[in-house]
Image (cartoon, helix red, strand yellow):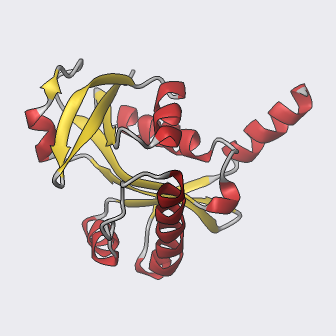
Amino acid sequence: MRSDRNEARSALRALELRAAAEDDTARIGEIIRDARRRMRERGSDQWQNGYPAPEDIARDIRRGCGRVLCEASRIVAYAAVDFDGEPAYAHLRGTWRCPGPYVVVHRLAVAGEALGRGIAEEFLRRIAALAAARGTASFRIDTNFDNTPMLRVLRRAGFAHCGTIDYDGAERLAFEKALE
């Protein structure tokens, strides 16, 4: 059992976090479509309105916000990582715990074949380390109230629920984690 855990940790450490490139859009699109289908099958309405669209991913890449997590050079996860803030977060119904600059992640999606291996948590750990190295004080993220897999990931990763925001016409649960 301990050996299995050590192997799993070693496999996560071997993952590569890098900026997404234009050549990655087809694979990112596959991951997003698969995540959207899984949400729909769970009865969630998140991402069922065509968001995130290919234009969102292209904009992320142009702005330098798109990030991919790769395993043996195959993309297994995607997210938009933004250090410029999220305007909707200024209208939080609740209280942020850490004032000042923060990193925000949007559109986090893991490939179906990589589920259940801690990929989403590892992605968040890598982003937290990147942000902390830049001197960023906190990490903020939001999700739909019925996105139970993401809610579990956020809880395990140490994020605290801070309130709700309106994002893209829907209410979202907002979370924050202080960075060291």
Residue 22 pos. (x, y %): 41, 79
**Residue 102: in sight, yes or no?**
yes
Q: Is residue 13 above or below residue 31?
A: above
**Looking at the image, which residue is at 36% across and 55% down?**
45
**Residue 85: in sight, yes or no?**
no
Q: Nearer the viewer, residue 16 or 85?
A: 85
Q: Quadrant of residue 58?
A: bottom left
**Figure label count:** 0
**Looking at the image, which residue is at 52% across and 35% down?**
153
Q: Is residue 98 above or below residue 172?
A: above
The C terminus appears in which quarter of the rendering? top left
Residue 3 lies left or right of residue 100; in this view the side is right
Residue 72 lies left or right of residue 148; in this view the side is right
Residue 56 pos. (x, y %): 28, 69
Residue 32 pos. (x, y %): 47, 66
Q: Quadrant of residue 98?
A: top left
Q: Is residue 27 above or below residue 122?
A: below
**Looking at the image, which residue is at 29% across and 34% down?**
173
Residue 97 lies left or right of residue 119; in this view the side is left
The N terminus appears in which quarter of the rendering? top right
Q: Nearer the viewer, residue 151 or 124?
A: 151
Residue 88 pos. (x, y %): 13, 43
Q: Is residue 179 above or below residue 146?
A: above
- Residue at the farthest front position: 43
